[in-house]
Image (cartoon, rainbow, N blue to C red):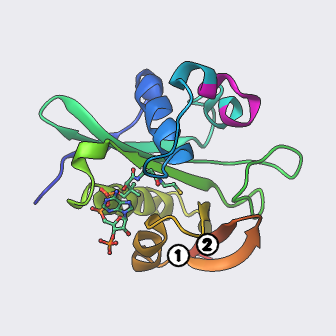
Amino acid sequence: MSIPIRSADRSDLRFLEQMLFEAAFWRPGQTRPAIVSALAEPELAKLLADWGRDGDTGVVAEMGAEPVGAAWYRFWSDDDHSYGYVDASIPEVAIGVVERHRGRGVGTALLEALVESARFEKIPALSLSVERDNPALRLYERIGFEIVGSGGNAWTMLLALESR
Ligand SMILES: CC(C)(COP(=O)(O)OP(=O)(O)OC[C@H]1O[C@@H](n2cnc3c(N)ncnc32)[C@H](O)[C@@H]1OP(=O)(O)O)[C@@H](O)C(=O)NCCC(=O)NCCS
């Protein structure tokens, strides 16, 4: 199945927030907070604050006119970062696919497109954080991410790109 993928821009912020919520509360059957209050929590709020700043790069998968998934990366600094941070030259990836569209290649297509953008921008590597029991780990390994560290219940993973 070929999945149309386009670049994300500032107008995609609301959808990216929905996908961030999916990524933060991925565990099946867990009790979820309301999305509005979850996104207002500082740890989550900062992840997409000021979306569209220099270096922010994202892709959106669409079926018809409907967005069904998004993946993006952002640069962070030693002083201000999230869980999968490695260093300031390596942006951190986040991804989410609308639940009813999972398991059909959307996530793979999104990550492949994001990696292509990173290579084009001559970015040395991509990193991410994934909880150890999240099945997304297998997807990341298939794309080529490797475990380089851990924090709490999560792995930090790195995909080194050719320009490194
Ligand atoms: C992880 C996610 C983005 C993958 O997108 P997808 O479109 O389902 O991925 P694909 O169909 O391309 O690939 C399937 C792989 O994704 C992973 N996966 C994770 N959750 C899945 C789900 N609910 N259904 C199907 N695959 C899932 C598995 O590795 C699966 O491979 P496997 O069949 O060998 O186990 C998507 O399932 C999702 O949004 N999950 C909830 C949010 C999340 O966990 N984000 C990552 C946080 S680090």
Q: Please state which amino acid type lies under the numbered disc 1.
A: Phe
Quadrant location, ligand no. 1:
bottom left
Please state if 107 lies on the left or on the right of 148 as rendered.
Answer: left
Q: Amino acid at mark 2?
A: Leu
SS label for mark 1? loop
- The boundaries of the magenta stretch are 38-44
User: Residue at image x 44%, y 63%?
Assistant: 115
Q: Is-magenta flag for residue 89? A: no
Residue at (89, 46) in percent of width and height: 79
Residue underneath mark 1:
145
Q: In percent of the image, x 65 and y 27: which residue is there?
A: 49
Residue under numbered circle 2: 158
Position of the N terminus, as image quadrant, is bottom left
Mark 1 and 2 residues: CB-CB less than 8 Å, in contact?
yes
Label at residue 64 = none
Q: Indicate the position of residue 18 as horizontal and vertical percent values.
A: 45, 31
Residue 146 seen from this side: yes
**Viewer-nearest residue: 163 or 3:** 3
Question: Where is residue 57 drawn, in percent x and y?
Answer: 50, 44
The relative height of residue 84 versus residue 138 in the rendered view (above or below) is above
Residue 8 drawn at (x, y percent): 40, 36
Residue 54 position by quadrant: top right
Q: Secondary structure at mark 2?
A: strand
Seen in the picture, residue 21 relative to 88 is either above or below; the reply is: above
